[in-house]
Image: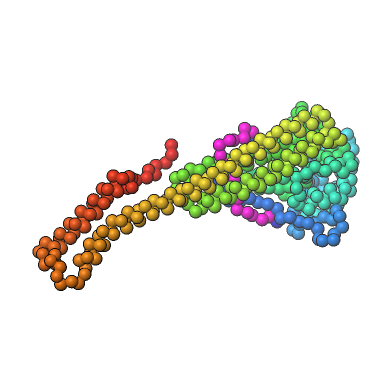
Amino acid sequence: MRRKNDAAPGGRARPDRRGGEQPAPGRSLRAAARAVHLFHGRTPAVGAAPGDLVVPPGGAASRIRAMAFDREHLVEREVEDPGALRSFMQDGRTVWLDVHGFGDAAVLHQLRDVLELHPLAMADIVNVPQRPKAEAYGDRLLIVLRMARVLPGGHVEFEQVSIVIGPGWVATFQEQEGDVFDGVRERVRAAGSKLRQMGADYLAYTLLDAIVDGYFPVVESCGDVLDALEEEVVDSPTHGTLSRIHAARRLLMSLHQTQWRQRDAIAVLLRDDSSVFTEPVRVYLRDIHDHAMQTLDAIETFREMCVGLIDIYLSGVSNRLNEVMKTLTVVASIFIPLTFIVGVYGMNFRDMPELGWRWGYPGVWIVMLAVTVGMLLSFRRRGWLERRSRGRRP
């Protein structure tokens, strides 16, 4: 159900907010630069009715977790029958429905009926991936975002998260278990927290904030990898170094594209006066928009750094080639006069006086050695034989 692309997570400008688990710097270098997991797209067949759901074959069974809360009370439970949600959502409390898994079409259709979702909205939720967006269907608001996480071992995973906001409730839909909402769940469970005192729109803001802020640790891991690649490029670059730089560049392009669209989706919510978000909560939406811009700035910095690393790598390769060519030129220059001398005395003429000299053979060797030493001293005096320092940077 997933495909893997070689890509990588770098750099100087570090985002000042952190969210989620940070990978160990030593292990994140190659692992984070090696794999990005994306979900295969699923679309209805050509000519299918609008709103048809494409259920992944062998997908995880749908699991529903419900949390209903107010200032004083919290009810948290697993829901096996979606029909039971009707009574659960009518007690005046704020309800969060967390749905994982799209493998059960019957459960998904029941959820659509219970939540009174438009068929097109449910299709956008199940038929992944969709572009990040915010669309209103009457008094229901659908927000589609892309969650990014750094998994143990340094792998980066993208997954679509759909958030539906209705009167007094919020529903989140994900294809797999595991997300960035653990902090939100703890805040819901904490008695007296602000989240318990606010409504469904504030809960939706908190979920949006967790998704957008989840990009900070991913971008931070990109910075760690690019820092290590910078040292590798300067000290001991290999062909694999260039591959890892390109992998990092591809990942940064994916991060930039996704976060740019998510920023636009948040901007749509800010401009929509008829939005389900009340005025006190809209202030917090501006903060999410600002966080998205921060990550975009950092991603742009790291993308420029990737281009710089490629230039440094190519310059290093060119310099090494020049060093090799210089060495070969020096060797060839030395052997040109030696070859001339040997060629002269290798001619089969009878009247060559030096051939009859007693010290002729040692004399030729002395001349050749003198020429060799003289040329080496001349090359060194001109600076052609200076050794390049290969010491590491401090």
Measured as percent of width and height from the top left, residue 379 is found at 29, 48
User: 117 and 89: which one is in front?
Assistant: 117
Quick check: is 115 in the magenta stretch? no
Q: Is residue 31 left or right of residue 278?
A: left
> Which residue does the image show at 66% across and 35% down from the upper left?
294
Start-end of magenta stretch: 2-17
Colour scheme in use: rainbow
User: 233 and 278: which one is in front?
Assistant: 233
**Is the N terminus in the top left, top right, bottom left or bottom right quadrant?**
bottom right
Measured as percent of width and height from the top left, residue 266 is found at 76, 38
Measured as percent of width and height from the top left, residue 168 is found at 86, 36
Measured as percent of width and height from the top left, residue 248 is found at 58, 47
Q: Note whether 245 is above or below 198 in the view shown.
A: below
**Is the C terminus in the top left, top right, bottom left or bottom right quadrant?**
top left
Quick check: is 6 in the magenta stretch? yes
User: 221 and 90: which one is in front?
Assistant: 221
Q: Is residue 109 left or right of residue 26?
A: right
Question: Quadrant of residue 343 in the image?
Answer: bottom left
> Which residue does the image show at 87% across and 57% down from the upper left?
49
User: 369 and 218: which one is in front?
Assistant: 369
